[in-house]
Amino acid sequence: MLIIAAIFLIFMGRFAYIAATGHIAGVDLTKRSNKKYEGDSVIRAQRGTIYDSSGNVLAQDTNAYAVYAVLSHDYVTADKKPLYVADKKKTAKALSKYLPMSEANIYKQLTPKNKAVYQVEFGSAGQNLSLSIKRKIEKQHLTGIYFKESPTRLYPNGTFASHVVGIAQTPKGSEDSGSQDLVGVMGVEKYFNEQLTGQDGYKNLTKDSYGYSINQNKNKVKAAKNGQDVYLTLDSRMQSYLESLLSKVNKKYQPASMNAVLMNAKTGEILAASQRPTFNASTKKGIGDVWRDTLVEDGYEPGSVLKIATLSAAIDSGHYNPDQYYKSGSVLVSGKKISDWQTAGWGMIPLNQAFARSSNVGMVKLEQEMGAKTWKSYIEKFGFLKKTGIELPGETAGTLQYERPLDQATTSFGQGINVNVMQMLQMTSAIANNGTMIKPQILADVGQEQQITPIKAGKPIKASTAKKVMQNMEDVVYKDYGTGQVYQIPGYKIAAKTGTAQITGPNGGYLTGASNYIFSVSGIAPADDPKYILYITMKQPGNMTDSAETILSQVFNPMMKRALEYTKEAEKDKQQQVKVASVLSQSTKDAQKKLEAQNLKTTLVGSGNLVVQQLPKAGSVILPNQRVLLMTNGAMTMPDVNGWSKNDLLKLAQLTGIDVDIKGSGYAYHQSLAVNSLLDGVKQIKVQLK
């Protein structure tokens, strides 16, 4: 009994010590307890959305799901009911309806040879599942089937300027590190990754021993800061049409590659841009065919389209006599023979036919008249050998082979010089803008929509020179000896230059064969009032059943015609534009009556009877049937946004100062706040479009 009493006294003494000091074996139990029951819950920031020029969504955040199956019989409820896959045949049959995987292969996955396997996944077939597929599987009530959620990027248009918009994805191994951040790895997603990426927030949680949150009012919260939105110059209507034209030609003629870009001649806005091979950004189908954005990352010899620069340089430097005759066909330079594409030539012809006939010999003569130093100075003035600075990653500056007289001569017709697509567009813009080059731009703005401002990239030639070159480009299309007669579009005046460039072989020298070329065309329309520049290249058509010009015209003509018709419609709309009247300090009734008389829609934001703010502001020029938001005195209230466009919702955000989180594309059909609810203290309104 004495021993038991002694042990009891020792135990009670030890307990009293721990209770009094809060320490055991040198460990502060209070700190350890706090460490155990306090932790941070990450509030994930949303990546910014990428929009086209009209506010249509090109890329936005969403969630994807991966399905997995628990096989271990240890995973059961408290009353021993299975939480693992109990009926494997039934499960395989059900999953095969929703996964791109056969019932037999699913069953094989569910019955591994190693019986100790705790859980299994289904490879790529079970990854990146949409919410709708997840819900359909859940409705089957399959025991042992579970899902992991992860952030992903939604590209609603599929094959749509895929290399330009790019893709963002979670890096490999990010799950192991606990990070789920999306990172841009291509295109605009990569170039503006820093701006698009937000900053995660956190919520410091205090939990009891059962894991439930306690002391909610004492929890520390740092709000997430979402990434900035990016607005591009792309016009979805033009882009979709270009994609369909390229796909049709690509399927029929099977070229090794194609590039096509439509640019606003006055502003440099890239309205549509694509390449082949391409990929579906939504499904990732075809992404392995070519990872590079060939519009900026690939350098190539441009061939005869560069004669635009050669002719410009000769005229501008005073070394061009249009009436001077020369012998076409071939010429010797440093003992090497340079031939015209029509090797027999056309006999003695004047220089004013050399460009339209695409005579290499004529261009060599102009280069020799100018001299190597003068010609090189114009190559540099036209922006070659340096990047345009377009907002896409990996742009190449190009190279020039210029040491020998032969090199200097061949550059006059686009050999021995490497360029990129954007440099060629920039060069052509000088002809469309009275000698001033305009930088190509794909970015409209970061954070908010804004009208693009043209950026001048230099003035390589005089306005008078540009006018003469434009006439020569018209001759290409309209003279009976022109190489581009197929590019005529009834009702519009077209100026163009065709190109055929040899391709360097893997062992040096140039490839031979009828299709081993890069065929191209660069066109301006209308020639008398330039609105658009369209540049197309096609490399090595595998099924060349038509001439190169005929093939390229199947993209050039309908694309340029569609753009020009769109301009006509826009100009017609411009004639119908309305100058918004001022209704500040007027009664809501009078204000609405006044604006509706201008054929404008109105919406009140507030419960008062006087207008204190309006958007668009008085004096703004807009189209009929556009919406004008009127903020009233009194409490600010939530309007009914059903049927609103994205632009209307952005106006609401600007007027109220409240963030409007817009999901989807089309028109609004769901809003997070009830109509007429108070907006005081509201930080965000969520709206879904369809």
Image (tube, helix red, strand yellow):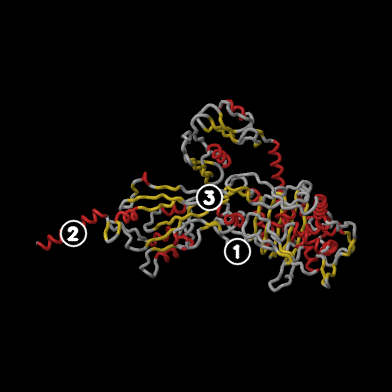
Q: For residue 557, say whether it is visible.
A: no
- Pointers 1 and 3 in contact (C-beta within 8 Å): no
Crowding at label 1, few (<14), some or many (≥20) Cα neighbours within 10 Å? few
Q: Quadrant of the N terminus?
A: bottom left
Query: Closer to the camera, 586 or 148?
Result: 586
Q: Secondary structure at mark 1?
A: loop
Crowding at label 3, few (<14), some or many (≥20) Cα neighbours within 10 Å?
many
Mark in front: 1 vs 3: 3
Distance, label 1 to label 3, CA atoms, is 31 Å
Extreme residue toward the left, this view: 1
At mark 2, the secondary structure is helix
| Real-space Cα separation, disc 2 to disc 1, in angstroms | 74 Å
Closer to the camera, 613 or 505? Answer: 613
Q: Which residue is mark 1?
A: 289
Label 3 or label 2, whichever lies nearer to me, is 2
The amino acid type of the residue labelled 1 equals Asp
Q: Secondary structure at mark 3?
A: loop
Q: Amino acid at mark 3?
A: Gly
For badge 2, the amino acid type reads Phe
Q: Which residue is under mark 2?
A: 11
Place of residue 121 in the rendered image (x, y in percent of width and height, measured from the top left): 43, 62
User: Looking at the image, is mark 1 or mark 3 earlier in the sequence?
Assistant: 3
